[in-house]
Image (tube, rainbow, N blue to C red):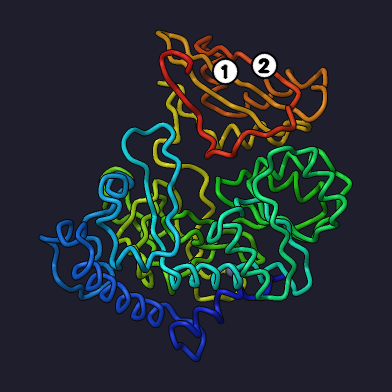
Amino acid sequence: MTARITPLDPWIRQKIACPDALRRDRIESYQLQKVQETLALVRSKSRFYQNHLKYSPPTLSGLDGLAHLPFTTAEDLREHGGQFLCVSQDEIERVVTLDTSGTSGPPKRIYFTQADQELTIDFFQVGMSTFTAPGDKVLILLPCERAGSVGDLLATALGRMGAQPVKHGVVKDARLTAAWMRAQKVDGVVGVPVQVLTLARLCPDLALKSVLLSTDHVPDAVVQTIQQTWGCQVYNHYGMTEMGLGGGVDCGERRGYHLREADLYFEIVHPVTGAPVTPGETGEVVFTTLTRRGMPLVRYRTGDLSRFIPGKCPCGTGLKTLAHVRTRRGGTVTLGEYGSVSMAGLDEALFSLAGICDYQASLLHTPGQERLRLLIKTIGDPPAQLGAEIEEALNTLAAIRFARQAHAMQIQMEIQKLDPRLPAPVKRTLTEGSSYA
Ligand SMILES: [Zn+2]
């Protein structure tokens, strides 16, 4: 059965004043006008962009002209934070300081006006209505504590649609959260993939309507496990703070995200050359904000790799569909002549095994020998056969299989019972080096 059209469709039609069915030419003429307005705004108000766009053409004849403008990078945000602002500090309602673990220098700071935050709430309200009805009780396992935090804005959005948001915050003690979920009888959960998987493994007897996973790439194996365990449907959200927290969300077809095309313009570029890729080809996701006032961004490089799925979504919308983000630029580690391996590949192999709720992986390169170290976390005592199952699952990854067949790879595995006091969620990556961190 074909899913109903994404609620983003009528919402965007109304935002771009398009009374008829959404056509690409109508969306793109709106986007071109908004890109021009954004460029005029940053050129007149942002000290960073006044310098950054000094040698760029003053206007664009089409959206493809954006390709001649320089990118904005995470390093630019770190080095020039406040210089991006297009309003006075007094008009800033919320500043998000992003974790800089693994990088040196000042942290990234992203600034939002109240109007910017309203745009996010508006998107959350429409996006959540894809799978949430008025009256539904929705548990929010994202940071909620501060006013204007992602969980706080989401709660406001759910309240406006007549649902009952329950602000919890990220899971710190999975046992306590699981007991609490059981008592609260929630209909839906919004959270981080590995944390929600852990809860599903801890309390498999719950029945939920829907789950939205966000903030990290979402392995299919995690989706399948949660769906089968709780009898619910799992949706993916794509977003990052720089994007205004929300970027896109699955429709009922759940084959990729429909995007906030009235607020963001997305491009896919070659991750090395930066040139636009052929439509449908995989590359790095780049976006330009169309409606942000406090800190607009022009051609911001996300580091995420994805592609536009060609053709129309079966839900019937004229919006684009961005394939689910699986990996980031630099997220693939090469095993020399044997091929490459990524965290996404390991995720699919390992999360499908019963009992595994989290793991860390690091790869040590030594001359003639690769060493993959895995620290696996299980719910309860690890089953006796788990080690053998992991070996078998790893062999489904061609590069690992080839390297092991050639006696060029060792696997060091440690299986531990999960400590329910979970660490703060981070973007999970396959670390590599010539010595273990
Ligand atoms: Zn769709």
The residue depicted at 74 percent of the width and 27 percent of the height is 418
Image quarter for residue 116?
A: bottom left
Tell me: is circle 2 under 8 Å from ligand 1: no
Three-letter residue code for mark 2 = Glu
The residue depicted at 31 percent of the width and 49 percent of the height is 77
Q: Which label sits on residue 30?
A: none
Query: Vertical placement of 292 versus 270: above or below?
Result: below
The residue depicted at 70 percent of the width and 67 percent of the height is 131
Left/right of residue 129 with respect to residue 335 in the rendered view: right
Ligand 1: give its quadrant: bottom right
Measuring from the top left, give residue 214's x and y in whole percent.
59, 52
Query: Vertical placement of 395 versus 271: above or below?
Result: above
Three-letter residue code for mark 1 = Arg
Query: Vertical placement of 436 versus 427: above or below?
Result: above
User: Are dots 2 and 1 in contact, CB under 8 Å?
Assistant: yes
On the rendered image, what quadrant is the N terminus found in?
bottom right
Image quarter for residue 266?
A: bottom left
Measuring from the top left, give residue 130's x and y in whole percent.
66, 69
Give the crowd class for mark 2: few <14, some 14-19, many >=20 residues within 10 Å. few
The foreground one among 395 and 100 is 100
Q: Secondary structure at mark 2?
A: strand
Tell me: is circle 1 under 8 Å from ligand 1: no
**What separation in Å lies between label 2 and label 1 (alpha carbons)?**
8 Å
Left/right of residue 297 with respect to residue 427 in the rendered view: left
Q: Which residue is mark 2?
A: 414
The foreground one among 277 and 385 is 385
Give the crowd class for mark 1: few <14, some 14-19, many >=20 residues within 10 Å. some
Measuring from the top left, give residue 350's x and y in whole percent.
67, 31
Q: Which residue is mark 1?
A: 373
Residue farthest toward the front in the current orientation of the protein: 90
Image quarter for residue 358?
A: top right
Measuring from the top left, give residue 26's x and y in whole percent.
40, 82
